[in-house]
Amino acid sequence: MFDFLDSGQYDLLGAFWVTVQLTLYSAAGSLIWGTLLAGMRVSPVPLLRVFGTGYVNLVRNTPLTLVLVGCSLGLNQTLSITLGGGDFKSIGFRLAVLGLSAYTGTFVCEALRSGINTVPVGQAEAARALGLSFRQVLTLIVLPQAFRAVVAPLANVLIALTKNTTVASAIGVAEASALMKTMIENESSALFAVFTLFALGFILLTLPTGLLLGWVSKRVAVKR
Amino acid sequence: MSTTSVLYDAPGKRAKRRNVIYTIAALAVFALAAWWALAIMADKNQLTAEKWSPFVKDSRIWTTYLLPGLGETLKAAALAIVIALPLGALLGIGRLSDHAWIRVPVGAVVEFFRAIPVLLLMIFSYRLYVEFANVSSDVRPLYAVVTGLVLYNASVIAEVVRAGILTLPRGQTDAAKAIGMRKGQTMSYVLLPQAVTAMLPALVSQLVVIVKDTALGGAVLGFADLLSQKEPIPANYGANTIATLVVIGLIYIVLNFALTSFAGWLEKRLRRAKKSTGAVLGANDAHQANAPGHATNESGV
């Protein structure tokens, strides 16, 4: 049934490796960008709050496909931004990481913000009454609880990101879904086998993430 | 922003002065970034008037490209939600069944389709229609997009329905049993009507996910949706790629922002009304379903 794999024509592991790399780089990028955005959204400076809110609302309501196509057609082909040069393959990969981070960052931001909102206001009031400064309130009281509260939502963001990396095939990145499209066209007699293979691949990537981080979130959750 | 924030007190004299300084610094950074972006765009002639003016001056750009594209996008989204809603409701109820032979397979189906990228489902169903169904090639992309969206979103909606029914207090079922209702009656007369109200905001915001995902068909399967107009417009109106992408993006944003705001308004209204049990599945809960294995909120496609 899976004899089309024996031809050595298809680099299945290579394609999934690209998917994993896209996920990891974009996860790092979106975590940094999302934390910055969350910082802006809860900051005491109104201008930063307006920027954060505006960015999140705009980007969250844009299709990821449009974001990635914009990175490729707009940034690269029209404005000749290559993010450090290299061949077509590596430019496409970096543009995909940029687009995925810009998009996923909004979801990370919202998760972190909801985490900060789970901390009861009374705690901060008590901390201020004790004379703690803003930074002490933030680093000693609020953030430790916020991060523990958002492990599960962040796990969901990570899983959604893993699945969203398939969109990178729209700008020619050779990840798993791009290979699946080629294989399905060439091996149409093995349509169901090919689909099952790739479906299992994604389940193998997402299920352990969900289970592991779900377990972690239960262990570290602040019981209220 | 509520009136009291966890993070900072109402600003006093010094804090106000500090905020002004931060505001000026932030303005400077934003201005620099904007200037840099505009300089690059001007360098490549993307800011000249003739690149942008067709969108306001030439009505044909709307009637030939943008509006038909938007029509296709809305058609695919509407078809997907109309088919996925009843299917999702059935799956959701099936997952709550007392019989393991219904509950287990339905659960497996739901978890399977939630764990797989929607693009994979679209590519697969496209080929399925090529090989096994007599679908003419000009509607095949639409069929493939709708099939992919239905498979994924029906399983998401199934989880929303299940969560909606589970938020109802157990007493509801007990009371229905006490007055002698059968299981089917309890579900259709007592639980579902309340659950539907509770999950309306979640369902409306799931529409946003569907609208966004239709764009995949335009980029990968040759579906003539709004996003796929990114090529013919610059080809006919003088390489105005950036202007075109910005206009297309704005249409999506306006559409989805309207849906998001509607969901938020609905949620607030339902929470206030408290006619039922007061339990409402929030707009963010619709996105929970991206994670196989557990159900908490937020994220999306």
Image (tube, helix red, strand yellow):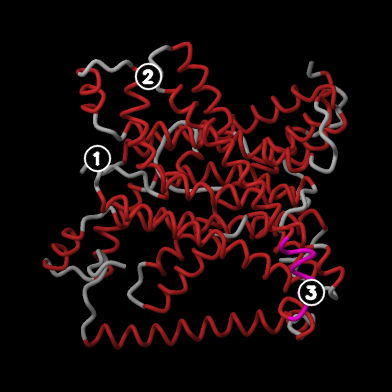
Q: Amino acid at mark 2?
A: Gly
Q: Residue at x 40, y 72 (%)?
A: A49
Check disc 3 and report its element: helix, strand or loop.
loop
x, y percent for residue A196: 69, 25
> In the picture provided, is A160 more to the left or to the right than B273?
right
x, y percent for residue B126: 77, 35
> Which numbered disc, 2 or 3, marks the residue closer to the eye?
2
Q: Residue at x 45, y 28 (%)?
A: B92
> In the picture provided, is A173 more to the left or to the right than B170?
right
x, y percent for residue A55: 51, 68
> In the picture provided, is A223 more to the left or to the right than A208?
left
The quarter of the displayed image where residue A224 is located: top left
Check disc 1 and report its element: helix, strand or loop.
loop
The quarter of the displayed image where residue B117 is located: top right
Tell me where the magenta segment starts and ends, as one range. B57-67
**Residue placed most toward the observer, B100 or A119:** B100
Return the mark for residue B240.
Answer: 3
Q: Which residue is mark 2?
A: B184
- In the figure, B146 relative to B174: above or below? below
